[in-house]
Amino acid sequence: MNTKPLGWFGIIRLGLVQTALGAIVVLTTSTMNRVMVVELALPAMLPGILVALHYGVQILRPRLGYFSDVGGRRTPWIIGGMAVLALAGISAATATAWMETNALAGIVLAVIAFVFIGVGVGATGTSLLVLLAARVDDRRRAAAATIVWVMMISGFAVTATVAGDFLDPFSSARLVAVTASVAGAAFLLTIVAVHGIEGPTAAVKPGEAETTKPPFREALAQVWAEPKARRFAIFVFVSMLAYSGQDLILEPFAGAVFGLTPGESTKLSGVQHAGVLVGMIMVAIAGSAIGRGRLGTLRFWTIGGCVASTAALFSLVIAGFFAPNWPLRECVFALGVANGAFAVAAIGSMMGLVSSGRASREGVRMGLWGAAQAIAFGVGGLVATGAVDLTSYLVGSPVVAYTSVFAAEAVLFIVSAGLAARVYKSPAEPTPAPSAEAQHPTPAAPYAAALDQT
């Protein structure tokens, strides 16, 4: 089997898969969102539910990762997942167009489409990260995580710009045609990007599959029983809950408390994203240039990013009570830098820890963490906006409402820092012999039992 680590060109090739994924996702979660609400005058809750649904479906990530573990290859699942995502994206565009003449039928098709969007994203994303972790040298993992993340954001930006030009003058037929073109191009790009990059798979000896590839429920229970994998899953959920909670309330906070116009608050969001990019680049440079020094470790940037995010969020709490005489842009930029550093370090940590534990469970392990991240993203926005509405209703002060949520997110990041520290202190779990594993199967954890019902 080819075990030579990927060079920078190989990492960029795999990053193109993230670009392709981002190109389809941005049309389904942003463009179609706007069309439903503005052009079709449908309730804003509809696209909100659809987007939350595509996150919720990604609870299937551990199972999808398990399937790639059983087969021993990742590229078929990357390509297959992208095919599902492309077809689901086209179906979502068709559903949006259908809503213009038959709202109920269009909504039913949209629900089905967004379910498969979640499946496609889960299958492609999980197997891609496992393949990247297996083929990238330890010293390049931080940089690799930055590259694939930035390339996904590039997919958002390029598609939004180019597709936006082709969508005018708008029509439902044009929306379907543009989406189909983007989806087709993304699928072809994925095939080219992964062609020959995985190398041959080692042959499986007779009887080996029975001892190393247990049923899904047992495999997931085994991974959940690993202290490091379990703690990291909890860390991912808590930290991503804090990370995603601010997305939907930062601009409203700037408008309600600082009196910024829609244009000004949009620019503020741009400042935050610029900070995210700076934070990611900082981690990539530190990991590659400093190397084995403390400042070059993913542990330092994961924990440090959580602590810095806490400080930045508390600065927003203070900002609320001193508005408008407070440097809001600087605080938001600092929050972006801290979030970017934390996010890319967490992804790099996933890549580094995915092989820590039982052998042949990498897909299940990465799927577990991916499911935790997706669920946190789906829940975070709903909880944050709901908390703002509830607090504002009870207290009658938008300042208290927004700052209370920012403070809660800051506390979650502190908790996340403690969880991350425990993960890195955990000793590596030994890989048990197949015979012992077969004789003493790990009892199914509650999480495994719940997931097995899906």
Image (spheres, rainbow, N blue to C red):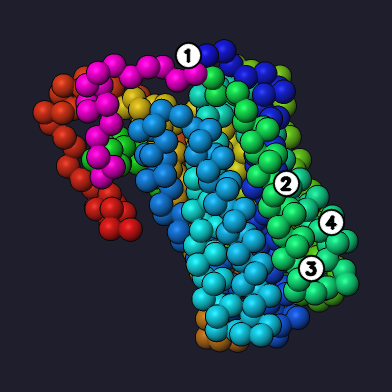
Disc 2 packing (10 Å; few <14; some 14–19; many ≥20): some
State which region is magenta: 200-217
Disc 3 packing (10 Å; few <14; some 14–19; many ≥20): some
Q: Which amino acid does label 4 sit on?
A: Thr
Answer whether residue 346 is visible to the viewer in this image.
no
Circle 1 sits in a helix, a strand or a loop, which is it? loop
Magenta-span inclusion, residue 387: no
Does residue 201 appear to the left or right of 17 in the view shown?
left
* Location of the C terminus (image quadrant): bottom left
Q: Which of marks 4 and 3 is nearer the N terminus?
A: 4
Circle 2 sits in a helix, a strand or a loop, which is it? helix
Residue 350 in picture, x, y percent from top left = 50, 35
Does residue 450 appear to the left or right of 84 in the view shown?
left
For the residues carrying marks 4 and 1, which lies nearer the camera in this image? 1
Q: Which amino acid does label 1 sit on?
A: Met
Residue 17 in picture, x, y percent from top left = 65, 39
Q: Name the residue located 25 percent from the left edge and 21 percent from the top edge.
A: 208
For the residues carrying marks 4 and 3, which lies nearer the camera in this image? 3
Does residue 308 appear to the left or right of 362 in the view shown?
right
Residue 161 is labelled as 4
Tags 2 and 1 in contact by the CB under 8 Å rule?
no
Circle 3 sits in a helix, a strand or a loop, which is it? helix
Q: What residue type is labelled 3?
A: Arg
The span from disc 3 to disc 1 (Cα, nearest Å) is: 46 Å
The residue at which mark 2 appears reads as 185
Q: Which of marks 3 and 2 is nearer the N terminus?
A: 3
Q: What residue type is labelled 2?
A: Ala
The residue at which mark 3 appears reads as 174
Which of 382 and 47 lies nearest the eye of the viewer?
47
Residue 201 in picture, x, y percent from top left = 45, 20
